[in-house]
Image (tube, rainbow, N blue to C red):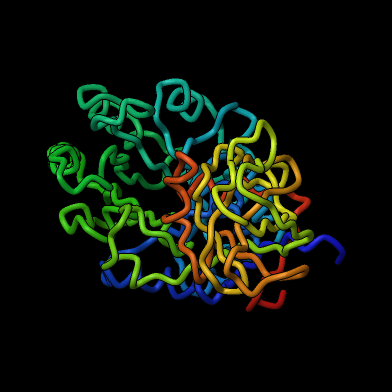
Amino acid sequence: MARAATLNIDLDAIAHNYRVAKSQAPKQKALAVVKANAYGHGAIDVAKKLESDAPGFAVACIEEAVELRDAGIRKPILLLEGFFAADELDYICRHDIWTAVHNNFQLEVIASKGLAEPLNVWLKLNTGMHRLGFSPDEYRLAYQRMKDLQQVSGITLMSHLASADDLASSETQKQVEQLNRIHRDCPSPRSIANSAATMKHPVALHDWQRPGIILYGSSPFQGDEDVQAQLKPAMTLTSEVIAVHALQPGDTVGYNGTWTCERPTRIGTVAMGYADGYPRQARNGTPVLVNGHRTQLVGRVSMDMMTVDLTGIDADLGSAVEFWGEHLLANEVAPWCDTISYSLFTSITHRVHRKVKNCVES
């Protein structure tokens, strides 16, 4: 390996975090959400690690499900957005894929198809997110239609929370109550809890939880030390210093000179840039660790490199740099980049070397 930019994944941390999520509702079930390549952590590796514990997995689309099936994952897989074309249903039926149904197109396709095996359907209710799902009035009709179809083997009532990470909001309570009202007329298992609800909203802990970001060691609550303390960061992004410069007051750093030295300063150039997935919008002062010492990004992030302040730090060529992970939480870095940890995790590109610890042997 030449260039030092490296993504380190600890699968034992993910297994630990799944157990934390499951412990919030030990008598219920919890799908492990592995969409978007397991939030950048590697869907196949994560699914193999969790398959002995998780009753199933959740992905966004058929392509993600096919990848898992081709890798030998046999547990049920839920398509959170359902299917997009009728020809997906044959594969879905043959490979024990569960599908969300959130519109009349999907419902009518199922009703018109002669299927080799009946489908497990997660019927989506729009309780206020206003992205996908039937309205409450439409939902009862859709539910009864699904119940009457021989193509359907089971139905789970499903919705999605809009503001579960905002503990001051009353929206979560309203959404859960709306799902519960529907449940009185549609007595099937329910699922509405995402990571935030799993950890902080007991009222949402129905039959199936759907933990996502917490599996990867990041709290959905900015600044919540209680939740974060229970989790283990699973991704650590690292590189090393590849050049050192001694600058004087008035010297500027990087494109357009967005940072100016106010004192004699040692600047380290690091092999990490926005082509690796590190956010270009990261501001001066964004925290980084060099040889375990806290310092800051200075100057604009470029395609392949960035610059950090080494003043007062015992660091030189080859010194280790951590951008987020075990010793510097992604949730601390993300606000400096006007984003969230989800985006940091999913943005890392293929040219960054991957090291995965504690894999399950095939």
Q: Foreground residue, 300 or 312?
A: 312
* Rendered-image quadrant of the C terminus: bottom right
Occupied quadrant, residue 179: top left
Task: Pick the residue in front: 344 or 289.
Answer: 289
- Relative image position of residue 307 (x, y in whole percent): 66, 51
Q: Quadrant of residue 243?
A: bottom right
Residue displayed at 39% across by 73% down: 19
Q: Determine the residue positioned at 67% across, 56% down.
A: 267
Instruction: Quadrant for the N terminus, please.
Output: bottom right
Q: Relative to 116, is 214 above or below?
A: below
Give coordinates of residue 324: x percent, y percent.
54, 61
Q: Position of residue 54 (x, y in %)?
A: 46, 67
* In-front residue for pair 222/313: 313
Which of the two residues, 92 or 3, is positioned nearer the viewer here?
3
Count all numbered tags in the image, as a single digit. 0
Q: Residue furthest right?
A: 2
Residue in the picture at 38% in, 42% down: 122
Q: Is residue 220 above or below residue 182?
A: below
* Side of 232 relative to 288 (left or right): left
Quadrant of residue 155 within the rendered picture: top left
Image-based side of 73 in relation to 139, left or right: right
**Residue at the image position 73 percent from the left and 69 percent from the top:** 316
Q: Position of residue 249 (x, y in %)?
A: 61, 47
